[in-house]
Amino acid sequence: MALHVVMLGPPASGKGTQAVRLAQSRGIPKISTGDILREAAQSGTELGFRAKALMDRGELLGDAEMIGIVNERLARTDAANGYILDGFPRTVRQAEALDRMVHTEPLVVIDLAVPDEELLKRMQTRRVCSGCAAIAEPGSSMDACERCGGTMITRADDSDEQVRQHRLDVYARESKPLLDYYRGRPTFRSINGAQAPDKVAKELAAQIDQMLAVASRKRS
Ligand code: AMP
């Protein structure tokens, strides 16, 4: 059964880290809209140029553009057996569009809940690979990426205090309403994302297995 997962949660809640682990263990791609935009910015495309200006200020790109990007990405063959979406949807309009794109399988929606003080701390200390976008283990002081050997850097939108706070404000205004949008569904779960990454991963895997078991019982 194809697995379609949406990872919700504020910036630095651990969505990216957990999405990578889950994608690896289930053999399906992680699709991160932030990574797609950062790649476009590195390649110097017109989209990348516009995206970088907005990302560096902690603003969101427009819904129509993001919906178009994700629609195209989900149509690629590697997404045929499912995917983990990280960073999309970020608004209710994006969520409505996603519901129109995915109607064969239930969408598993995972919210990672983390208090604001912890998020601000994580954003300030987070380091990512400039080459492959891998996220360093918290507290790691390695200068080279363990995966590809690339240089570990601080993301531009993590390096400014005002932008860090602004992203939390944008999350509260634009993305928190998604919790009400999804909360009533039987495939929605909220997990305490302030726990150690291994613990979050374990809980996440258990919740997904339980939801898949219920779904396959209903089918048979
Ligand atoms: P992330 O890596 O998910 O933290 O995303 C980094 C930045 O990319 C965000 O702060 C936004 O500027 C932009 N972005 C990523 N995903 C979306 C989206 N679904 N809608 C609008 N903007 C997005």
Image (cartoon, rainbow, N blue to C red):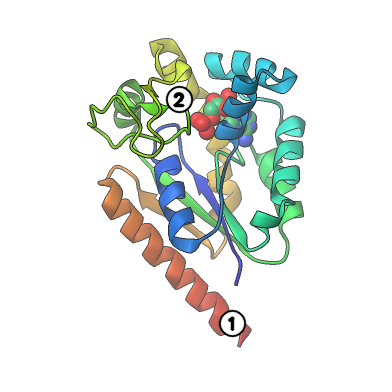
In this picture, residue 42 sits left or right of residue 208:
right
Amino acid at pointer 2: Ser
Foreground mark, 1 or 2? 2
Instruction: Judge the density around disc 1: few (<14), some (14-19), many (≥20) Cα neighbours within 10 Å.
Output: few
Amino acid at pointer 1: Lys
Q: Quadrant of the C terminus?
A: bottom right
* Most foreground residue, 68 or 62: 68
Q: Please identify the residue farthest to the bottom as the structure is shown.
A: 220
The residue at 74%/18% (across/down) is 46
Whether residue 2 is visible:
yes
Residue 67 in percent (x, y) is at: 73, 39
The residue at 66%/45% (across/down) is 95
Q: Which residue is mark 1?
A: 218
Q: Which residue is mark 2?
A: 130
Mark 1 to mark 2 CA distance (whole Å)? 45 Å
* Placement of 5 over or under 150, stated as above or below: below
Q: Please identify the residue farthest to the front as the structure is shown.
A: 149
Label 1 SS: helix
The residue at 45%/31% (across/down) is 11
